[in-house]
Structures are given as structure tokens and as C-alpha cells.
Amino acid sequence: MQLHTRLCDQFEIEHPILNAPMGGGDAPAELAAAVSEAGGLGLIGGTTGGGAPWLVEQIRRTRQLTDRPFGVGVISHLPSAGELMAVALDEGVRIIAHSFADPTPFVDTAHAAGALVICQVRTVTDARRAARAGVDVVTAQGTEAGGHTGLVSTFPLVPAVVDAVAPIPTIAAGGIADGRGIAAALMLGAEAVWIGTRFIATTESGVSDGYRAHVVAATADDTVLTDVFDIVTGMPWPDGVSGRAVANPFAARWRGREDELREWAKDHRDEYLALGPEREVDERAIWAGEAASLVTGVESAAEVVHRLVTEATQVLGGRPGDLLRGP
Ligand SMILES: Cc1cc2nc3c(=O)[nH]c(=O)nc-3n(C[C@H](O)[C@H](O)[C@H](O)COP(=O)(O)O)c2cc1C
């Protein structure tokens, strides 16, 4: 028996599992290729300081590592989004994911190039807007998620988005890191899962060993949803979007003092951005979600995909039947 949904056919993949397109180099070619090679859909996190040249290099490297489909995700409210999408389309990428902004300006160009468009949303209103824009797939991201996210939890958000955008397929994101989570997401009506925190703690992610160790050590209650890291870096985000990270001394120092931090950052931003790797886990954002509780070790991305598929298949093969009694 094998898990199978409409999105497996649409993306031409075996398993309905995507790695999140984590920016800043956190989801590079190696991670996307490993997830695709394992039968999922790998997504390169396209938005980094390296811009278009970095993305071209990653796309070409992914192609050297796998013949299977993969995609590119961009942070769509940033000025780089249009250029990064154009570069990905020119390089022949046929799955583009947009996050954090109205996807309307991007959809026609992607479709004209023959690409599918996924849009990640955090509210039903944004899901409806994405559907009106003509996207092919909507990702409903709950507040449990690592990285930038909204305020609605995965459990109420996913079925509401499924209903709002049907027949457009929905992917569930936020708090999913094992087979039980995948089974639950599919029961809520999602047709695939999009996973960040579990994949950040893999050998192929782009983060440091210290970052991975911090995610493995963290539990859900160690994470905080905060604006402090965005204030200090000066990175703009839409209203209603904050970042979930593992709490660290920097977050403890500035949470609740955001106005003071804005002043402090005017003089200290460059110094903060130049902090060396030895200060990373104390001072920088270790983006990770509440699913950190379920991440107990560093594995390869292929091991993660295969284990999740096995677990989800077992859960779906056994539990629903166990729960029913009578004729
Ligand atoms: C380290 C990290 C970086 C992320 N960067 C991005 C990004 O650049 N663009 C994006 O759309 N989402 C980003 N996200 C959010 C993910 O797309 C996704 O919604 C989230 O990881 C799902 O929840 P989970 O972490 O519980 O699996 C990031 C998440 C993490 C953990």
C-alpha cells in the first residue's frame, strides 16, 4: 500500500511530502534534490543574500543531483521576488511557490511558462485571494510553523482552507514532523504536507551543526513567535506575520522592548549582522517550529521521507479501522 493523492499526479511525485522552501540558504540544492530523489517534492528556498546568481547555481546543482521534479520558493513581498521567479522559469523550473504576499502579479507569467504555482497562506481570506489569483495549489500554514507565520493553528486552518479553495488542492504546513501528523493532515483534507522544522535537522539542510543541535534539543515550549529578529535585521514582513524561533538570550533580552530595540538597531545593525558563528545560537534567529518536540536527532532527508511515509501508511492502514465499531 502506498500513500497517494491528486498532488502526487500533479507534481509527478511518489509521496505527498514537500520540504519547505526555507530561505537564507537553509533549503539549498542538496536538500531539495535529496527530498525529490526520495520521492517527495524538493523545494529550493530561493530568497537569499546571493540573489539570482546563487539561485541559478542551486537549480543547476539540483539537476545534477536528481532527474526528478523539484521547485523553487520565493518570499513574494520582497523586491527580488519577480526576478528570482523569472530566473527559475528561465532555468526550466516548473513548480514555483510564493509566500507572504498576494500572488496575483506572478501567476500569469508562471503559467505562460508552463509552471504550476503554489501559494502559502496563513488565513482563509488570503487563501481565497490566492484562489482568485488562479494559483494551482494552496499551502495552509499554521502558527505552529517554524520561521515566519501567522496566528491561526494548523488544525482549524487546514480544513477551512480546504473548503474555501476546493477544488484547488491544499497542502498542510505547520507542526507536522511524523507519520501521525501526516495522517492527521490528510484526514483534514490536505493532499500533501510541507515540512520545515523536521528537514532543517537533516544533514542536507544549509544550517550549521550548532543550529541543528539546538533544534534537536528544543521542545515546542522553547519556541517563541516574535518580531525581535526582524527588527534587528531590518527585514520587512507583512502585518500579521512574525517569526517562530527557538528562544535564546537575544530574544529574552528584547521581547517586550521592541520600541527600544528599534532604536538600538539603528546603531548596532551592522555589528549584529556581522556576528560570527560562535555567537549564532545565542544571538541570531534559530528558526524552528513547535514540531521541534518531535525532532530528536539529525537524519538524512531520505531517511526522513522514507520513515514519514512508512509511519503515515501504518497509521492510516490501522487506526481509522480500529476506531470504528458496529456494522
Ligand atoms: C529555517 C526556516 C526557514 C524558513 N524560511 C522560509 C522561507 O524562506 N519562505 C517560506 O515561504 N517559508 C519559510 N519557512 C516556513 C516554512 O515554509 C513552513 O511553513 C514551515 O516550516 C512549516 O512548519 P514546520 O516548521 O512546523 O514544519 C521557514 C521555516 C524554517 C523552519
Image (tube, rainbow, N blue to C red):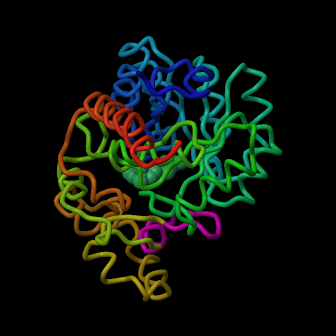
Residue 115 is covered by the magenta coloring: no
Q: Residue at x 60, y 38 (%)?
A: 97
Q: Is residue 158 above or below residue 299?
A: below
Q: Position of residue 108 (x, y in %)?
A: 80, 31
Occupied quadrant, residue 126: bottom right
Q: Residue at x 34, y 31 (%)?
A: 305
Q: Position of residue 226 (x, y in %)?
A: 45, 73
Q: Position of residue 170 (x, y in %)?
A: 63, 42
Which is more toward the observer, 36 or 17? 17
Occupied quadrant, residue 8: top right
Q: Residue at x 44, y 71 (%)?
A: 225
Which is more toward the observer, 249 or 301? 301
Residue 239 is covered by the magenta coloring: yes
Q: How many marks?
A: 0
Note whether residue 49 is visible: no
Q: Which residues are magenta?
A: 227-242
Which is more toward the observer, 211 or 81? 211
What is the residue that sits farthest to the right in this orientation?
132
Q: Position of residue 237 (x, y in %)?
A: 59, 63
Q: Is residue 127 above or below residue 186?
A: below
Q: Residue at x 77, y 52 (%)?
A: 128
